[in-house]
Amino acid sequence: MQNSSKIFMPILVILNLLFITIVCYLLFLKPTDYLLQTERIDIKNKEGANRVVISNEEHIPNPIINGKEYERRVIPAGLLFYDKKGDERGGIAISENEDMNFNAIAFDYQNADAIGMYSQDNLVTNYFKAGITINDKDLSGKPGHNVNRINLFTENGDAALIMKDVNEVPRLVLRVDNSGEPTIEMYDSNGHITWKK
């Protein structure tokens, strides 16, 4: 958890600085009745590659990995980060459909998600889930591929930490259910339980 905090601290600092800058601009450099409104802002480096993009759903760019554009599976509004070549490196996404809200902060390896923090809740039922996902890098280099290793989450009042092997098989599960009952479970490489307490 300490490493996760270290990773997410810089993004919180950047967001605070961005917010303070916008507020100061609106309060001191423009008349108080003026409001800056737009649907997308691109911040580029001197070579013309995107470094940061802020956008609504209608204008969010598709992900770019190794210079190639891919179709985005979920269309959010958000804030995207890019490396100096213009490849996506993570961001903040806010999305929803008719039934579900989904919000996420993610940081990427060169080819896929590395670590993410998310929350979701159903707009019709009382279902909710929030957590942190940590992935190994897929060394094959296939875009969008990673190896999920750690999941820490709460789901409808059940809290769990699941650690997986390199084949994404859960091997150790620590859980506290919504009644407060804790359990520890260990599994073999085939996913069969070998020990429980």
Image (cartoon, grey):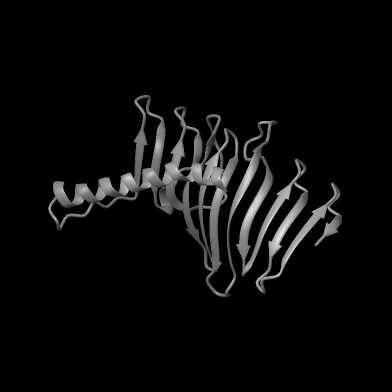
Please say whether residue 173 is visible from this viewpoint. Answer: yes
Residue sitting at x 62%, y 58%:
153
Determine whether 21 is above or below 158 in the image: above
Residue sitting at x 78%, y 50%:
171
Q: Which residue lies furthest to the top in this view?
A: 47
Q: Where is residue 139 in the image (x, y as percent from the top left)?
A: 68, 31
Residue sitting at x 61%, y 49%:
133
Determine whether 83 is above or below 23 in the image: above
**Left or right: 11 with respect to 185?**
left
Q: Where is residue 58 in the image (x, y as percent from the top left)?
A: 42, 52
Q: Residue furthest left?
A: 31
Label total for image: 0
Determine whether 50 is above or below 76 in the image: above
Q: Where is residue 89 in the image (x, y as percent from the top left)?
A: 50, 37
Q: State which quarter of the image contains the C terminus.
A: bottom right
Determine whether 119 is above or below 190 in the image: below
**Left or right: 155 with respect to 31?**
right
Residue sitting at x 76%, y 51%:
170
**Left or right: 124 with respect to 45?**
right
Quadrant of residue 182 in the image? Answer: bottom right
Please say whether residue 145 is visible from this viewpoint. Answer: no
